[in-house]
Image (tube, grey):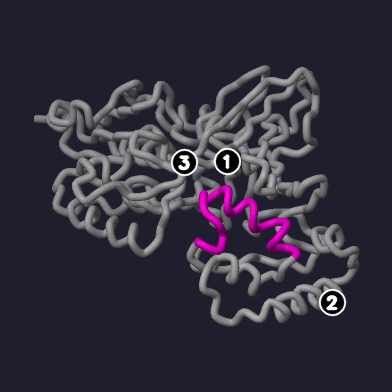
Amino acid sequence: MAEFDYLIVGAGLYGSVFVHEMKKRGKKCLVLEKRDKVGGNIYTEEIEGIQVHRYGAHIFHTSDPIIWNYVNQFADFNRYTNSPVARYKDELYNLPFNMNTFHQLWGVATPAEAREIIERQKKECGITQPKNLEEQALMLVGRDIYEKLVKGYTEKQWGRQASELPAFIIKRLPVRFIYDNNYFNDCYQGIPIGGYTKMIEKMLEGVEVKTNTDYLAEKEVWDKIADRILFTGGIDDYFGYCYGPLEYRSLRFESEVLDMENYQGNAVVNYTEYEVPYTRIIEHKHFEFGKQEKTVITREYPLDWQCGMDAYYPVNNEENNALYEKYRALGEKENKVLFGGRLGMYRYLDMDKVVKAALQAVEGIKE
């Protein structure tokens, strides 16, 4: 008899939801986490009384009441609404593209005026069959929005010129002809009061967790102690990159404590000018309406990903998706192993979709 029913590799959101549900089913579980803390990329750390999002800004949003009620078991959520600001040189614009943005760009006051300018600019571009991301964006929103709010940010994010990126990356650019700076359209939105780490710790209550533990470094040892395994790391890493590595974009974070109460007046400010090397500055206290005397900011720098680096954004182009299918086929032959999460499934998932996918995985298990 194995010592554990389930070995969960990765103490991020997916793994934590999964293990919580398995514990409710009476299963004995062990969680292994490569990092020195739980929470995965939603880990938050308290600095100067401020919950700092160590791996980028995370705002929980969903239109699914079942998922919203589920996460509210583990935390009280505040009323934070994601309303980022874009900075292009010395100009400030509201996001997403809405009537406030159009007034800031052109001085217009009505939807009809804004629509007329956008349609005119789209027509002037004369693009009907976009060959790349630049042409796709120009066809969708015209030159002004593209040049100031899309081009530089996108090129920094992907590490390539927009004219060299495939058009499918931007399938649409939402344009709202209303005065509304709420980035998301979901019914429910907020951030756990006291940070995401406390929420994850609540999910993991009563379960043995080993941090600083690399499952793949001693895979044969760990495989013997559990009947089944949930692996939430990279599926290509699990198979030793036998078909080659899947492609990701990575990030570098540069944080500092400032001896001032308020640095930028907003939780997220995007820097859309290409010459500014970071894509955004996060001021963490504004996620929880903080009044602390000091503040903590984080600059976010996109990076080319290499094996061994933290992987953030899957590059889901045709080549990588075909490569993932080869790994997925291998995964289906692993009788006792499940693959889940953003890295295990090789697709970007908002947090509500992570929770839903984990719950569906649990429901799909036949004892």
- Amino acid bearing label 3: Ser
> Relative to 139, is 87 on the left or the right?
right
Q: Which residue is mark 3?
A: 250
- Real-space CA distance between mark 3 and mark 2, rounded to the nearest whole angstrom: 41 Å
Earlier sequence position, callout 1 versus callout 3: 1
Mark 3 falls on what kind of element?
A: strand
Please tell me the numbered disc located at residue 112: 2
* In-image side of 194 versus 218 (left or right): right
The residue at 78%/69% (across/down) is: 177
Q: Would you name the residue on which mark 1 appears?
A: 58
- CA neighbours of label 3 inside 10 A, class few (<14), some (14 to 19), many (20+): some
- Image quadrant assignment for residue 134: bottom right
> Type of residue at label 1?
His
Specify start and end residues of the magenta stretch as a single range. Answer: 144-164
Single out the mark in the foreground, 1 or 2.
Answer: 2
Q: Is residue 180 above or below residue 175?
A: above
Q: Element under label 1?
A: loop
Q: Is residue 174 left or right of residue 163?
A: right
Q: Which tag, 3 or 2, sits closer to the chain's start?
A: 2
Q: Which mark is residue 247?
A: none
Q: Residue 355, can we see it?
A: no
* Picture quadrant of residue 258: top right
Tell me if mark 1 has few (under 14), some (14-19) or many (20+) residues whose alpha carbon lies within 10 angstroms of its own.
Answer: some
